[in-house]
Image: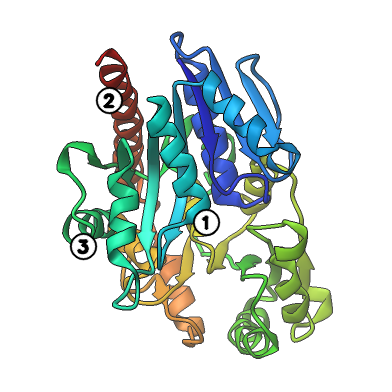
Amino acid sequence: MKILMIGYYGYQNLGDDLFVKMLTSYFSQQDFIEKILILCQDQYYRENNSKLKFIQTEKLSPLQRLFLLLQVDAMLWGGGTLSLNSQPKSLSRQQTICRFLGKTFAFLGIGLEGMNSASDLKSISRFFSNASFLYVRDQYSYNVAQNTLHIDPFKLHLGGDLAFLNLSFYEPFQKTAIQAIPQLKNLSFTGKHWWGEGRAEFYAQQLIPIIEKYNTIIHLIPAQMKAESNDNQFHEKLKNFLPSNQCEIHTWSHPEDYFKQLSQMDFHIGNRLHSIIAADLIGVPNIGIGSTASKMDNYIIKTQTLSSERVVDFMEPFSLEKVETILTHYKQPKAFILQESQAAQEGVQKFLQFNSKSSKH
């Protein structure tokens, strides 16, 4: 079997780079999978297996894309959130070509978000219905697929987030030291690149009481670093409102680097979903910034760990007391993590079984 992977790859986005790492590692270990081709914006990934080949999308002509499709058995979009208001034209064309060539086109581990009364639900429904297999990562997305988009139950699967696929990756970064008295020496914060001065000043106001009481160093760690959409664009603004000697801006090249930095933290606050997932995966107490029914909210509710305390809305103040409460009472959601990992493995296995059955017909 040969696979072509597409997604939001090559933008140095933590979540998507984890999906690449998890899926390529999993697929490489399957004897019946001969080749995995991965399309990406920039090629900074490590080709640590002879089965893997990363290809920069900007170097491909339409004819070369077609040639790649002719070589593979399945094309899949792996991970991430799809917020659609209408049918995505480019992706829809690729899907149509796959169907014409008799290839599998699948979505693995995605979240569905952003559809409302103004969305073209008919075209979105048709787009997802034309997929061979649709594996979603949470109950909210499953309900949207089932009740709003009316996807055929035969091709719809509810699984786990792909970041949980291989838990052994996170073992070297686990927080093991248990403090008798909770510490707040190092706190990491992740905002989004497009946030402005107003948000920078607001979040600085939330962080300063923590700095004043605990002499905390604030570590601004981006979860996306592509040049024109680098989270550090916002972090530079935030730094201007914080004591310069107690604030550091970080960078990273690969997910391992990110986790090495995060593992040194006593607490994490972030708006990027996978910065919060990363914190849970290695046992760092955290607060996620997200609105009601957002992917952040859906995830934290799913963990059943301080669910109401660990989510704050955009521009909603979070007190020093809230941070201290979470710091004191947070326990890594180990049972949830194991369950989510199993669900992710089942989702990928079901796709492989589905593709195997489809190829025999």
- 17 versus 150 height, above or below: above
Q: Position of residue 309 (x, y in %)?
A: 36, 74
* Residue 128 disc label: none
Going 33% across and 59% down the picture, which residue do you hit? 123
Q: Circle 1 — which element?
A: loop
Residue identified by numbered label 1: 179
Calculate the distance from the C-alpha at mark 2 to the C-alpha at mark 3.
24 Å
Residue 165 picture location, percent across and down? 42, 35
66 left or right of 306? right
Q: Which residue is mark 3?
A: 148
Amino acid carrying label 2: it is Phe
Does residue 343 appear left or right of residue 254 in this picture? left
Rounded to the nearest angstrom, the CA distance separating label 3 from label 1 is 47 Å
Q: Given the image, on which type of amino acid does mark 3 rest?
A: Thr
Q: Name the residue rendered at 28%, 56% in the picture.
A: 125
* Tag 2 residue: 354
**Quadrant of the image occupied by residue 6:** top right
Q: Please name whichever residue, 170 or 153, is drawn nearer the observer in this view of the structure.
A: 153
Q: Position of residue 128 (x, y in %)?
A: 32, 49
Q: Residue 225 or 215: which is nearer the viewer?
A: 225
Query: Which image quadrant: the C terminus?
Result: top left
Q: Residues within 10 Å of mark 2 (few under 14, many from 20)?
A: some
Residue 191, image x and y in percent? Answer: 61, 71
Tell us which disc is closer to us: 3 or 1: 3
Q: Residue at x 46, y 68 (%)?
A: 288
Q: Quick check: can you spot residue 178?
A: no
Q: Is residue 290 above or below residue 335?
A: below
* Residue type marked 1: Gln
